[in-house]
Amino acid sequence: MWGLRFVGLLSCCCCLTSQQERAGPRAVSVKCGEDLLLVMANRDFFGTNRLISASELRLGAAGCNVSRLEQEGQAVVFEYGLHECGSTVQMTPHELVYTTHLYYVPTVTGIIVRTNPVTVTIKCRYPRVQNVSSDAVKPTWVSYNSTKRTEQHLAFTLRLMNDDWSRERTSNVYILGDLLHIEAAVETSNVLPLRLYIDRCVATPTALKTTDVKYSVIDYNGCLLDSKAEGTASSFLMSRLEMNRLQFTLDTFKFYKDERNMIYLHCDLKVSTVDQLPNELNKACSFEKASAKWIPVDGTEDICNCCDSGTCGFLSRRGETRRWRMTPRQSEWEGSSVLGPLIVQDYVDQKPVMALSLDDSYHMDIHDAVEHLPEGADNMVMVLSLSITGSVICFALIGFVLYKKLYH
């Protein structure tokens, strides 16, 4: 029925991660192929005899749409490549694990909803050592060596780091005004030395990349656009610890009038061999406000000239403008990763502030003044008060004596 050959000796699983809803029995079934993933979801998703709309289901962080309907419209089918729809890949010593998610996002009618969103985690596991069919199992974006026996796999990752970059950050909660420390990496094994680049990054308030609300953090093949925004300290680190890692800082922000206070960062990453010189398509550029110019992590400054115009990858020849095209081999050296959710809370100053207007100060008596003085100063106030009182009495006595002498 599915129309393709399936790989033996592999496993696939799906599990609900929502804490508030449970899908009905056999609501989702998964089949993992050599390079394809097929997901079938029953439209009676919760077993309540209420059919959900096909448009309420999306696959992966990229939000891929339903491929077709089956079973007389009672089931929806997603058919995509293993590497598509924002799936992630992870290597273990013994297997290769592809992970993606099926999202159910109910349509809001008016001001009420009758079901909660549901996220179903989907994993396909493949053994790394032996071939499980006539061909080796591999992602379509990686193929470096000439023989299948020695082919390796790439795993692109994004993670939060602590302020000195010494270890991974354990909390995803930030305060407005904090600086995010983000590390992108590609894990390789027994392949040529690689240099990692971040092609583009888009921030969204939900896990779906296709949402209408989004903010472009990195674009134009490696231009950190947020570094040019007013008042930001966002920047790539100008020195790499390793060629297969790239680090950058990002000022925290929130989406306007979005009470979820969440950010998801969707990034497209790619690699090149370290002997390939950086160019307009392979670069990492930050805007340096002090010098008012774009600065690259690697290579010469001219590769960043296109960041303002957004024409990166265009060459002019004989008055014509044409787009650079990546070769099929280059296009296979790409991947994507999602970081989130990041929780960004409002800044609240917890320090007590005492304001005293000029007019109010005229109505303070000596007791109020003592209450507002620092600890240990009340004795000084008492001595000062007695001194003033004594002086007034002395002046009164002197005046009285002088008056007696003048008129008697």
Image: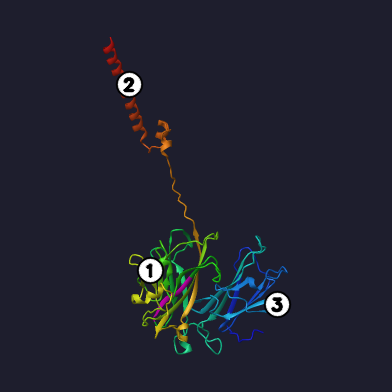
Q: What residue do we see at 41% from left, 68% from top?
A: 248
From the image, which quarter does the C terminus lie in? top left
Q: Is residue 302 magenta?
A: no
Residue 103, disc: none
Could you tell me the amino acid type at mark 2? Ile
Coloring scheme of the render? rainbow
Residue 177 location, x and y as percent?
A: 43, 58
Q: Which one is earlier in the sequence, the residue at label 2 or at label 3?
A: 3
Residue 393, disc: 2
Q: Which one is earlier in the sequence, the residue at label 2 or at label 1?
A: 1
Q: Please give the residue where the numbered disc 3 appears in the rendered image.
A: 73
Q: What residue do we see at 26% from left, 13% from top?
A: 406
Q: Please give the residue where the numbered disc 1 appears in the rendered image.
A: 287
Residue 402 location, x and y as percent?
A: 27, 15
SS for tag 1?
strand
| Cα distance in 3D space between marks 2 and 1 | 73 Å
Residue 12 location, x and y as percent?
A: 59, 77
Q: Is residue 25 left or right of residue 397?
A: right
